Image (cartoon, rainbow, N blue to C red):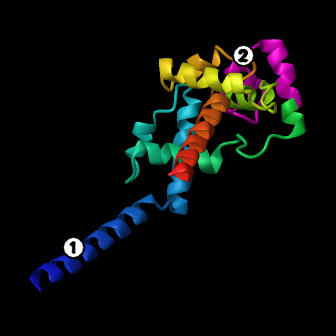
Amino acid sequence: MIEKVNKVLLFKIIKVEKKNTKQKLLWTKDEDSLLLKLVEGEKQNGSKINWKNIAQSFKKDYKQCYNRYRSKYSSKNTGFWTNEEEYHLIKLIELYGKKWSKISKELGTRSGKQIRHHYANITDSVNKKLKFTKEEDKHLLDFHNRHGSDWKLISTFFSGRSADNLKGRFNNLLNKKKWKKWILK
């Protein structure tokens, strides 16, 4: 009986702690406006934004401040790429090469990381839509045995296949193998 009461009490304590944690994560309108003012002040100084200093004004850590600012006030898109963005991306890559931060400033709607990822996995993957051959599958498994999950390195042995593309194919092959083993049992 005592053990049951202790479990109920422990459950209530955990529930209250979770409630308090969620309350800390919520942002008020006043906090949002203060966050915006602090970040704008940092930007005017011309230096890199010091999120740890900004976080001292709140009951939140610097990651929460950074993520809130990025999600609420960032001018970068996060959805699908428009045809216009795609067109400008190709032209800017022809002009600047793979200088992602320079392209990001010029394009203005995407971060350098988004641009690099999009280029590597969508735009540049000419063979991406082509099916993998049995020979490619054998090479992929062989290279994975030799190099582990270093997909960037493995992608250097395949032309027209990105690291993400190869990782996806490898996982697909693994699932097929597990499925075949399960069927044979």
Which stretch appears magenta? 87-115
Residue at which label 1 appears: 10
Of labels 2 and 1, earlier in sequence is 1
Query: Is residue 11 shown above or below 124?
Result: below
Identify which amino acid the numbered label 1 is placed on: Leu
The answer to whether residue 68 is seen in the rendering is no
Query: Is residue 80 shown above or below 10?
Result: above
> Residue 73, position in %: x, y?
64, 47
Residue at which label 2 appears: 98
Q: Residue sitting at 58 percent across and 32 percent down? A: 43
Q: Quadrant of residue 158?
A: top right
Residue lying furthest front in this view? 184
Q: Quadrant of the N terminus?
A: bottom left
Q: Nearer the viewer, residue 26 or 145?
A: 145
How would you classify the magenta stretch by its main secondary structure? helix
Q: Is residue 15 left or right of residue 125?
A: left
Q: Residue sitting at 54 percent across and 55 percent down? A: 32
Element assignment for label 2: loop
Q: Which of 137 and 33 is in front in this view?
A: 137
Q: In which quarter of the image is residue 23?
A: bottom left
